[in-house]
Image (cartoon, rainbow, N blue to C red):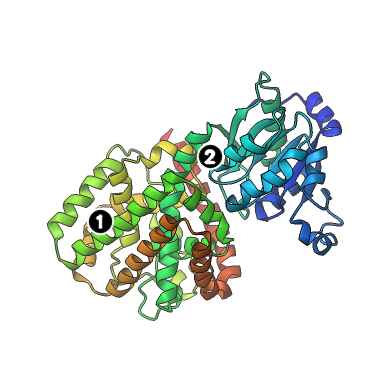
Amino acid sequence: MAIGTEEQIAQWKKEKTVGIIGLGDMGLLYAEKFSEAGWNVVACDREIMYDILKPKYADSKFKFVQDGHRVSRVSDFIIYSVEAANIEKIVTEYGPSSKVNAIVGGQTSCKRPEVTAFEKYLPDDTKIITVHSLHGPKVNTEGQPLVIIDHRSNDNGESLTLVDSILSCLKSKHVYLTCDEHDKITADTQAVTHAAFLSMGSAWAISGIYPWEAHDNKWLGGIENVKINISLRIYSNKWHVYAGLAITNPQAHKQILQYATSVTELFALCIDHKREELLDRLMKAKEFVFGKHTGLLLLDDSLLDEFSLSEKGRHEKSSVPNSHLSLLAIVDSWYQLGINPYDHMICSTPLFRIFLGVSEYLFLTPGLLEQTIEAGINDKAFRSIDLEFVIAARKWSSIVSFESFDLYQKQFEDVQRFFEPMFPAATKMGNDMIRTILAHSKKQEANDV
């Protein structure tokens, strides 16, 4: 990261303006962080919302204006914080108003469509340096990966230094990639992870189950707490956050399809009682993904016991062995796709690190994988919910393959409504869990060094 000197930054804060087009959760996070750090920030949301939102932002440190033209005309660094499905339409409208020699970027999770829109509709004198914070708006930005893509500047690093300096107030880890590198890595680290948690939520919702309230204690214990808390965390966010990555990124299509295929095939092996074939397949996946693993695990089950949404769950563990189909399928997917998840740790989201951690725990804790396989084949306690999980994974894969934002939104919001009463408690519990896990991971990394 090459930020300017203290004198340069002080001068830039007097002279330069940062523009935010779109005040959704991430756009607002950026606007508040930058203005609190002393940068001049001007921001807008949809023009139709101006009169409604003006009182809300009247006392903000940033300047709230009517539309993207007013942002673009005065801003030296313009960030489009809009839905991936709408990026081309909005850049078409506001891009031509960009200030001469402005730096322009965006926050979408798939960069190829975004950059294509910039190239097509921005004036030739503008620079294109785009960004992506690899975390949600409810996560502390400090220490989290922040991808920066210098796609078009050609000024010996001057524009990049300014962008680095502005973004430095987030205290994130700056990672420099190309557009295509970013899209491949985000697909590798997020597409299958999101598909797993979305499918879990869908399966519980269609079955009418709040798993933390189940009377048969099937979803108690640390790993179950991760599944529940992270699934609810995803559904408490806006649907377009996940739809953009899944639908606009061709790499994600292939991976989500593979996840649905792995879920289906592993489930079929279980119900056909093909134990040796299932064991052979999963041991190959284990060797491919974890064969070179050294050091301590990213997390352990006992670390997570306290993060249950029910009082009972904080004091008891499930007495029912789980088939853990969702976890088995994600490791199998990595194996089938030839993805080594450890290659992308520098760009990993908190959710990815957590899911990798519980996958490690399942596959590397002595005897646990074998117990899980036996449960999948012989114990019918999870058979019905596993069937719903298979259906959900295949449905999400179909929606993505149709490239339908409307279907994605409907499916997401149907499940969202089912879990909505628990979102406040789940958000607080999820934040506490993520902080604990990330702190634990840092200790493990230090021990490994």
Query: As displayed, is residue 412 above or below residue 65?
Result: below
Q: In which quarter of the image is the N terminus?
A: top right
Using the rendered view, name the quadrant where residue 430 is placed. Answer: bottom right
| Callout 2 crowding tier (Cα within 10 Å): few <14, some 14–19, many ≥20 | some
Please give the name of the residue rendered at 31% of the width and 69% of the height, measured from the top-left corner.
Answer: 386
Q: Mark 1 points at which residue?
A: 369
Asked which secondary structure carries label 2, the reply is helix
**Camera-side residue: 215 or 338?**
338
What amino acid is found at the position of numbered circle 2 in the picture?
Arg
Please give the name of the residue rendered at 67% of the width and 55% of the height, measured from the top-left corner.
Answer: 25
Query: As displayed, is residue 57 above or below residue 286?
Result: below
312 vs 116, left or right, is left
Q: Name the residue under label 2.
A: 112
Asked which secondary structure carries label 1, the reply is helix
Q: Residue furthest bottom?
A: 215
Query: As displayed, is residue 1 above or below residue 418?
Result: above
